[in-house]
Image (cartoon, rainbow, N blue to C red):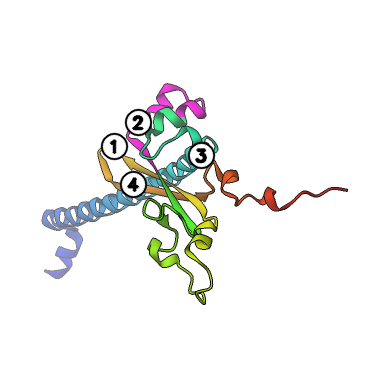
Amino acid sequence: MSPARSERGFTLLEVLLAFAILSILTALLTETVAKNVQKAADAIDKRELREIADTIFGKILFEQTEHRDGDEGSIAVDYGQWANLDQARADRYSMYRWRLKKTELVAAGTSEDADDSENLFGDPSDDETSSSGTETNEEEKSKAAVKLMRFTLTVYRQSEPGEALATLTRYLPPPDFEGTGGSSNSSGSSGR
């Protein structure tokens, strides 16, 4: 009876079971491949978005006097105009927005308006020097504070304003830096 059965081949139940196992494995493999393709596309989009944010940030820093704290804009409009993109390519970025935050910081010295500006390294009251007590309050106030502006650009999805996709930060002297006595040009003139 055994030789006759081996000549018959597979039963219908065995073939259906093999197809069921094969279809389950194919579905799992397809799902895994689709997730990996989506992750790769997201990584490319994030890299591209980071490069676009860096371009917009450079433009903002170049035109820093034209932008105020809290300014916002659309990636599609700002980058689309800068890169001269056609409308279809610019619409790809229509879900992304940027927000600028400008903060004046005290990097060194003492500031008369220490309450209004933030210390670069922490609390404004911590920037007092421990001297021997020979300096008066007037002399301390006459020291020029070195101030910096912290520019922070945050890129986010319009639907999720609280979740930052990219955050760029740069420290620059304020536009009126020459008037604070901290200019490198004020050290003297060189003549030949």
Going from N to C along the chain, the mark reached first, 1 or 2, is: 2
In the rendered image, residue 144, in percent from the top left (x then y), is placed at 54, 55
Q: Which residue is mark 3?
A: 55
Q: Quadrant of residue 161?
A: top left
- Relative to 125, is 2 on the left or the right? left
Residue at 37 percent across and 36 percent down: it is: 71
Q: Where is mark 2, residue-wise?
A: 94
The structure residue drawn at horizontal position 63% and vertical position 49%, both measured from the top left corner, is 183
Magenta residues, as a range? 80-101
Judge whether residue 168 can be spotted in this image.
yes
Residue drawn at point x = 20 percent, y = 54 percent? 24
Residue that label 1 marks: 158
Q: State the separation of the CA atoms marked 4 and 1.
A: 21 Å
Secondary structure found at label 4: helix
Q: Quarter of the image containing the N terminus?
A: bottom left
Relative to the observer, which residue lies in front, 136 or 14? 136
Q: Are marks 4 and 3 in contact (CB under 8 Å)?
A: no
What's the residue type where badge 2 is placed?
Ser
User: Quick one: SS at disc 1?
Assistant: loop
